[in-house]
Image: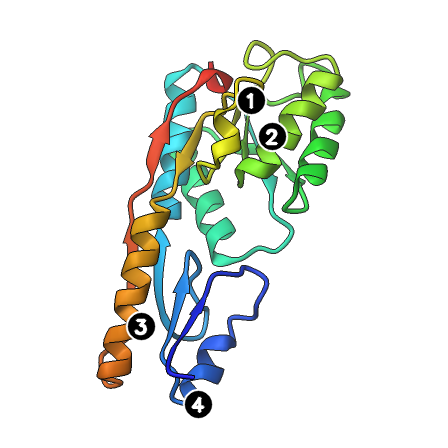
Amino acid sequence: MNGCLISSAHLSSQAGRICDDNRVPLVMVNRVAYQQGNAITCDNRAGGAMLAQHLLERGRRSFGIIRATNFSSTARDREEGFAAMLAEAGQEVSLRLDGRSNYDGGFDAGMQIAQMPADDRPEAFFALSDIMAMGLMDGLRIGGLRIPEDVAVVGFDGLPQSARRIYDLTTVEQPLTLMLRRAFEMVEARIKDPNLPQEVIALGGRLIVRSTSG
């Protein structure tokens, strides 16, 4: 094997060490290895901050997060960026629920939120992925809540499904095409010259404002 690209959030970050031990250039796509390795990623922290700022500008003053079960660097950075921007504005995340990294987990979280007393329920939720956000929205609606009148929802990824009229989800779109192109360039360069230094490149995401954030 000449080089390796890894995009899965479920593989161990030890992959960087294993590839290094076998002198195989590794580039992780949208995930940063905790141990070592090269990476091309969306600037997840900045994206989380953009979403928090957007919700603050919309007048929201209480916030929740629908978390990913596998707390990869991607999920961690999104949550930390969101929380840090809120802290700058004197706000905080008052509720964190496990969305299990999938639609069903988001749906269950939505049903749980819909059963909360209105005074205890955050005004806005950031689901750390679009797929959880779409499940969250369906759970909230079946539970009798209106979006965004009762609860605002934002996601992250820019999945094509998020633009469907039934969701019309405010999200941060990752520059996936550019990320993949840069990842291939990075691994090819290290196949040619294994002595190149390790690097992590974060590319900016694009905030797409739709109806779910008010």
Which mark, residue 187? 3
- Badge 4, how many Cα within 10 Å: few under 14, some, many 20+? few
Which mark, residue 134? 2
The x, y position of residue 196, in whole percent, is: 22, 80
Looking at the image, tell me whether mark 2 or mark 1 is earlier in sequence order. Answer: 2
Using residue 71 as the reference point, say whether residue 176 is left or right of it: left
Q: From the viewer's side, name the closer residue of 49 and 157.
A: 157
Question: CB atoms at circles 2 and 1 under 8 Å apart?
Answer: yes
Q: From the viewer's side, name the closer residue of 95 and 169.
A: 169
Looking at the picture, does residue 143 appear above or below residue 162? above
- Residue 213 visible in the shown view: yes
Cα distance, mark 2 to mark 3? 34 Å
Which mark, residue 124? none
- Badge 3, how many Cα within 10 Å: few under 14, some, many 20+? many
Looking at the picture, does residue 150 appear above or below residue 122? above
Q: Name which residue type carries label 2.
A: Met
